[in-house]
Image (tube, rainbow, N blue to C red):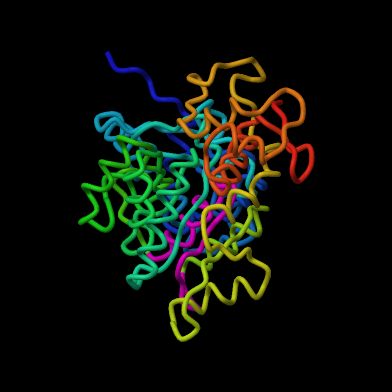
Amino acid sequence: MSTPLDPLVVSEVRLAMVPGVGPRTRLALLAELGSPQAVLGAGRSRLLQVAGVGPKLADKILAAGELDAEGELATACRHGIRVLLPSADGYPRALREVHDPPAVLFTRGDLLAGDQIAVALVGSRHATRYGLEQAERLGQELARAGVTVVSGLARGIDAAAHRGALAAGGRTLAVLAGGLLKLYPPEHRGLAEDVVANGCLIAEAPPRMPPMSGSFPQRNRVISGLSLGVVVVEAANRSGALITARHAGEQGREVFAVPGPVTSRLSRGCHGLIRDGAKLVAGVDDILEELGPLIEAVPKPGGGETRSVAELGLNDVEQRVLQAIGAVATEVDRVVQESGVPVHRVLATLSVLEMKRLVRRVSGALVARV
């Protein structure tokens, strides 16, 4: 005997399947009518009173009963796809706190607590060799520093970022514009399976819904919402990556950009971001040092309980640096000497340990265990 479906989940999925009901329209409908069930049960005249709802959209909402939400949920179950509402324990905390969080998340793979320390790498689908090299390099270096890499599984920069994280044995999250069973681009099916094994595929569209043109900008706010910061690796002036950077700014995330040749069309967007205040990225240290103060936004592992190095999942370099730091203030030069780790790696590792709330900066040259 099958388990009865949660009526709230069914209503949220059905509302998500209505063409034209994006995150902002959904918020307006809920503000006016109170719940997804009330929205789906409202009359035409009542729907037309909601800001942004015209006659055509009202008719689509009225016809929502014909949409097979139960079938989508059954399909999700058969394919091992998890369905998360914002009230669920597994729903990403950072995403829950943005202005317009997805009403429903469909996930395949695992979302871990450590994924709260995440950075997005985004950029052009038509990347140059230089851009691909930088995306893969940064993906590897972030993963080695214990940071989860977030991107959109698209061609070009996105795929290079995921591959870099995977090559370093790290975690990566891929946010799709369509449903998880309508993978786009189709040639990234193998890459998607690698992401599932080492992270998670995420979508707010039901599993069988194909990606539409308006889905990609909507998807971009999820990429930024999952991350502490967004790094634009390569982007022309009208690139979708710049939309992700704009969402990041609106969500209070840090914005970074990788500079490129001044003659490159695909670097103009990055140069514009840097001109307007984005942090210039030449290497992973530029990202980690900027994100260090954001550790207050990341809960301490284990809710404040003491945990061993093994439980925290520290790599060899992180362990060596941590063991060289005492409970009282320790000079960074002494940490370098006792750990045997090069100074540039020590500085980057200290930023990671700060984000994990294991050490604190006493001054520019002194650190101590928390």
The spot of residue 76 in percent (x, y) is: 31, 34
Quadrant where the N terminus sits is top left
Q: Residue furthest bottom?
A: 263
Q: Residue at x 47, y 47 (%)?
A: 142
Q: Residue at x 56, y 49 (%)?
A: 344
Q: Quadrant of residue 306?
A: top right
Q: Position of residue 325 (x, y in %)?
A: 66, 28
Q: Residue at x 37, y 56 (%)?
A: 136
Q: Nearer the viewer, residue 276 or 202?
A: 276
Residue 244 lies, with reference to residue 70, above or below; the image says below
Question: Is residue 17 covered in magenta?
Answer: no
Q: Position of residue 234 (x, y in %)?
A: 45, 69
Which image quarter is the C terminus in?
A: top right
The image shows residue 150, relative to residue 361, as above or below, that is below
At horizontal 33% and vertical 64% (from top left) the residue drawn is: 156
Q: Which residues are magenta?
A: 213-239
Which residue is outermost to the right?
Answer: 363
Tell me the quarter of the picture where residue 271 sits. bottom right
Question: Looking at the image, is 258 positioned above or below residue 198?
Answer: below
The x, y position of residue 258, in whole percent, is 51, 67
Which residue is most to the front? 337
The residue lying toward the viewer, choosing from 208 and 363, is 363
Q: Looking at this view, is 18 or 180 the one in front?
A: 180
The reply, left or right, for residue 179 in relation to residue 239 is left
Instruction: Check residue 216 for magenta coloring.
Output: yes
